[in-house]
Image (spheres, rainbow, N blue to C red):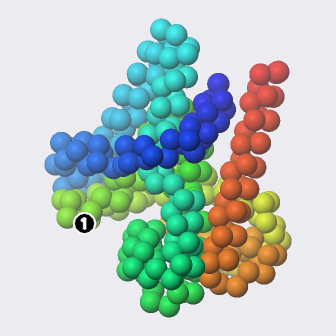
Amino acid sequence: MSFFALLVALLLDLALRQFEHLRGPRWFHAYFESLAFLAQAANFWRAGFGMLVIVLVPAVVTLFVGHLLDQIWAGLGFAFAVLILLLTLGPQDLHAQATEYIKAVRAGNSERVEGLARALLRAKPPAEPAACSEAITHVVFSEANERLFGILFWFALLGPAGAVLYRSTDFLRRLPPAEQRSGEFIQAVARLHGVLAWIPAHLAALGYGLAGSFEDAVSEVKTFYANCTLRFYQVNEDLLACAGLGALHAGGEEAGTERLRAALVLVRRTLILWMAVYALIALVGWTW
């Protein structure tokens, strides 16, 4: 059932791109404001408890509603699962954003290029065009996990509640700096999200290797870990960039929009690979 929910949600996501704005973080910001006092604790344990309350409440509510709808009629539970996936994917389509950036670069629209680059990088983009495209290529590999693979993994594992849990931690860590949060709370959110992202990030890195140059991807990952001094929950973004860039070596693309386009193709291949494996697992489960 969850495989078909994933498949339907991904197809609807492609067809209903005009409704993408409905899954933005506005609802989470409003929800967070009602519990903002929990994010101001300076004590390690209180900050951790407050963070867990904030991220678990939406997941528990989703679990309860999904179970209730399943008891009424399985079709309602299926529709609810698809709806939750549609609301938690993204929130913006990474492939569409990066493709628009490539078109703007080739059209020479510098204002559009800077706006799209700033949105993708969430920071001031490099002035050099090649460096900017390279930075966005790195982001594509890591953001694919945040916007897609992480959601799909936790949905497959825990159902709609898992997707909501993962998206809630991602929204929470991306709150604007103006929001009142203590340093301990911010660190607790980063740790939890890093832990939740760790398995899907490594599976995505493996997928990049299988969908591209496996030997180069493994070599880059080994080199990264040999020189890494970060804690395990802090490595996800750098690991994905290393694996993705390594997997592209077989193509020989130079830094720039061509390598960015190749990165987008690699992410799509990895998604297809993930879905094929999940379909096989689901088939084995049905016939067992």
Judge from the rendering whether residue 266 lies leftward or rightward of residue 189; answer left or right.
right
Task: Please name whichever residue, 196 or 24, is drawn nearer the observer in this view of the structure.
Answer: 24
User: Looking at the picture, which amino acid does disc 1 mark?
Assistant: Pro
**Quick check: can you spot residue 222?**
no
**Quadrant of the image for the C terminus?**
top right
Evaluate whether residue 145 shows in this view.
yes
In this view, the residue farthest toward the top is 72
Q: Whole-percent x and y of residue 189? A: 37, 55
Hey, which quadrant is residue 130 in on the image? bottom right
Q: Work out whether 167 lies above or below 75.
A: below
* Residue drawn at point x = 60 percent, y = 41 percent: 10
Residue sitting at the far front: 107
Circle 1 packing at 10 Å, graded few (<14), some (14-19), many (20+), is few
Where disc 1 sits, the SS reads loop
Q: Is residue 50 above or below residue 214?
A: above
Measured as percent of width and height from the top left, residue 76 is found at 50, 17
Q: Position of residue 209 (x, y in %)?
A: 76, 64
Which residue position is annotated with label 1? 177
Q: Is residue 182 above or below residue 252?
A: above
Give whichever of 31, 87 is nearer the camera.
87
How far from the left and from the top, in percent, is residue 98?
54, 66
